[in-house]
Image (cartoon, rainbow, N blue to C red):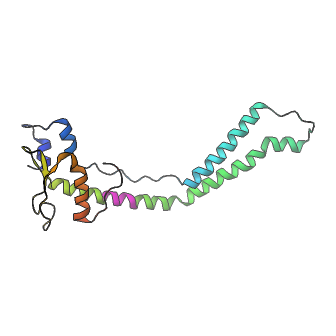
Amino acid sequence: MSVQSALTDTGHPLGEPERGLLLPPPPPAPASVGRSRLAVTLYAVAGAITVLWLMNMANGMPESADDEVAYRMGYLLGPLILSVPLALIGLTVQLTTKQRRARTAENEAAARHAAWVGCHRVWQAVRLCRRCRVAFFPEGAVGPHFPASQAIEVAQLATWVTGTAAQAFGVPEPAGPR
């Protein structure tokens, strides 16, 4: 019987561990655009400088013989002269690279979706022998010229489905865990 039928069979339900091993491959996550690593690094450096500056400000102005205004202004505002431009450069990098990162994320999502479609097609072709507790493909189930497979243990089904999808449809195997 097909794996789909075995999962929905109420007359002879599968045990929970076996049922979990026979579930279809989960759909891929949608595309998500991450932050630029360079921008995050610049933000972190600017933040660290600002935190150190705030800690110095909490301790108060040091007692010094020089009560010059330039010294006091440098002590009070010097770190900000470095941290504010770093944060602005980080923002500029973030905004200028956003379209490229979005395009890359969409291409990766499309590749993951193609791999998932292939895996799902293969999963739909899998048959389960309830008596032997093994899975297999009959000849021509995956494709018109695809040979029959040998019987495999249900525990190996996920790896077998992704490998067969890569072989049958030429889609790369997904990089992430199933």
Q: How many marks?
A: 0
Most foreground residue, 81 or 128? 128
| Main SS category, magenta section | helix
Along the horizontal axis of the image, is 167 left or right of 53? left
Kindly identify the residue that appears in the image at 65 percent across and 43 percent down: 47
Residue 14: x %, y % from top left: 13, 38
Would residue 31 be counted in the magenta stretch? no
Most foreground residue, 155 or 95? 155
Q: Quadrant of residue 106?
A: bottom left
Residue 154: x %, y % from top left: 18, 46
Kindly identify the residue that appears in the image at 15 percent across and 56 percent down: 125
Instruction: Please provide the residue range marked out in magenta.
Output: 107-113
Q: Is residue 17 above or below residue 125?
A: above
Q: Quadrant of residue 124?
A: bottom left
Kindly identify the residue that appears in the image at 26 percent across and 56 percent down: 162
Along the horizontal axis of the image, is 68 left or right of 101? right
Kindly identify the residue that appears in the image at 73 percent across and 46 percent down: 80
Would residue 112 be counted in the magenta stretch? yes
As drawn, the residue found furthest toward the bottom would be: 145
Residue 137: x %, y % from top left: 13, 57
